[in-house]
Amino acid sequence: MKYSSSKENYVKAIFHIQQEEEVVSTNALAKALSTKPASVTDMLKKLKAQKLLQYQPYKGVKLTAEGKKVALQIIRKHRLWEHFLVEKLGFGWEEVHEIAEELEHISSRKLIDRLDDFLGNPKTDPHGDPIPDAHGRMPVIHQTSLLDLPLHQPADIISVSNQSTAMLDLLSHNKIKIGTRLEVTRKFDFDRSLEIRISGHPFITISEQLAANLFVAYDATPKT
Amino acid sequence: MKYSSSKENYVKAIFHIQQEEEVVSTNALAKALSTKPASVTDMLKKLKAQKLLQYQPYKGVKLTAEGKKVALQIIRKHRLWEHFLVEKLGFGWEEVHEIAEELEHISSRKLIDRLDDFLGNPKTDPHGDPIPDAHGRMPVIHQTSLLDLPLHQPADIISVSNQSTAMLDLLSHNKIKIGTRLEVTRKFDFDRSLEIRISGHPFITISEQLAANLFVAYDATPKT
DNA sequence: TAAATTTTTTAGATTTGCCTAAATTTATAT
DNA sequence: ATATAAATTTAGGCAAATCTAAAAAATTTA
Ligand SMILES: [Mn+2]
Ligand SMILES: [Mn+2]
Ligand SMILES: [Mn+2]
Ligand SMILES: [Mn+2]
């Protein structure tokens, strides 16, 4: 099935909002799409008729399986094009979103799959967001402070909030840097310090204060 | 100024038809755009209001300078994208036109100029048609049989209509192949044979029959 | 040149996506 | 439990791009 750019934008916006709130409100959508609530109501009726979503007046909206599939294809296109713009054409990561907002509506399936290969099947777009694969599968990435990382959940360091010399000193001592993969193996109640393991290194213990300043990302895709 | 995809398609179609016939008819346009004459008339009024063309009811249509400028930008985008699809993504030259028909409407100027550089500023698209430069300048390419090439006009061999062994034998003897650049230096009335010069080679004489089977392209841009 | 034919325009509708204003429903705060 | 406020839908319209059918103009033919 082929949908208008406008419909694709709606479905994509609903998908994104749905990642936060279970059910998507008319007002939230109007804001996300820079349009008016009355226009949203109009469109929701059309999208419902096309079975892309479930909709009961006043009760919000939820994508169907088909709706999610459509959304993921658009997100795939958007993020692959962003990757292309940055990696091949030399755009800055902050200037590609608008252009991708147009490119994501180019319909050729073959085009996007070839582009994916041409780019070397990248896993993330320039903003670090995951790119769905050709089947629409996309890992769910959670970002939290290391303090809130579930036990035994492997994760990557993505940022360090405190850049003091003292902090960086401690980090280098512990062989921790951006991109380091680790997991939390124990949590000690007494001082809330954490035992962690960096793959291929011995277990080490770090303070609550250090952990609070380390931010990590991990794949939290529900296993089917 | 930004125009709808539909308007861009109209302006581009008018430009192309105008290369053949001085003035563009409503019916010709309807056929080119797979639409109905009544729809064309409607649109012509709108395009006239936007000063992209001159239009008098029943008297056909002609692009203004502004209209030509717009057309050339779209043609530039169309042909650069076709080049990208073939050279970078490995598409066949026969499958790219439709996709380029969509891509040509992506608006970012910076995108297309970067794409141009990324592709190495190609001179022609995969069908051999010239690509307008960033200022909208496009060489006028004439394609004729070598027989009709004007004297002293440098041109490139683009195709050979007879593929017989005898023909190919003669061609290789004369060091003529696709891409060879040459010019006609004399025409002999007696047997209509031609004297030609391949750059960097001695003058040679070829028969009318051979010349009739060689097709050439040359830049016939009017010098201002 | 008058008739027949073709081309083009006009008239009147339709679809899509959007808007404002008004009505209705749901949620929140006394 | 009201009353007030907020969210949402309905009603009525508008602009873009298209269509069909009918009228008008231009061209061709006999
Ligand atoms: Mn983006
Ligand atoms: Mn978009
Ligand atoms: Mn083409
Ligand atoms: Mn087009």
Image (cartoon, coloured by chain):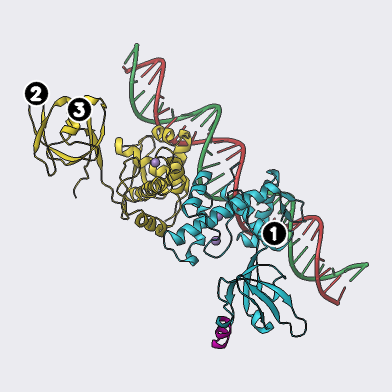
Chain colours: A cyan, B yellow, C red, D green
Residue visible at 54% across and 65% down in the picture: A127
Q: Nearer the viewer, mark 3 or mark 1?
A: 3
Q: Specify the segment rendered in magenta.
A: A163-171
- Residue type of the residue flagged with mark 3: Ala
- Residue type of the residue flagged with mark 1: Gln
Q: Are marks 2 and 1 in contact (CB under 8 Å)?
A: no
Provide the residue designation for mark 3.
B212
Residue visible at 65% across and 54% down in the picture: A39
Instruction: For residue A108, say whether it is visible.
Output: no
Q: Is residue A48 above or below residue A145?
A: above
Cα separation, mark 3 vs mark 1, equals: 68 Å
* B130 sits to left or right of B198: right
> Around disc 1, counting alpha carbons within 10 Å, would you say few (fewer than 14), some (14 to 19), or many (20 or more)?
some
Q: Nearer the viewer, mark 2 or mark 1?
A: 2
Whether label 2 lies within 8 Å of ligand 3 gets the answer: no
Is the stretch drawn in magenta largely helix, strand or loop?
A: helix
Cα separation, mark 3 vs mark 2, equals: 13 Å
Most foreground residue, C15 or A186: A186
Residue A59, how many percent across, how many down?
Answer: 77, 56
Q: Which quarter of the image is occupied by the N terminus of chain A?
A: top right
* A74 sits to left or right of D29: right
Going from N to C along the chain, the mark reached first, 3 or 2, is: 2
* Callout 2: chain: B
Provide the residue designation for mark 1.
A18
Provide the residue designation for mark 2.
B191
Residue A180, how many percent across, how many down?
Answer: 58, 72
Most foreground residue, B180 or B208: B180
> Around disc 3, counting alpha carbons within 10 Å, would you say few (fewer than 14), some (14 to 19), or many (20 or more)?
some
Most foreground residue, A99 or B201: B201
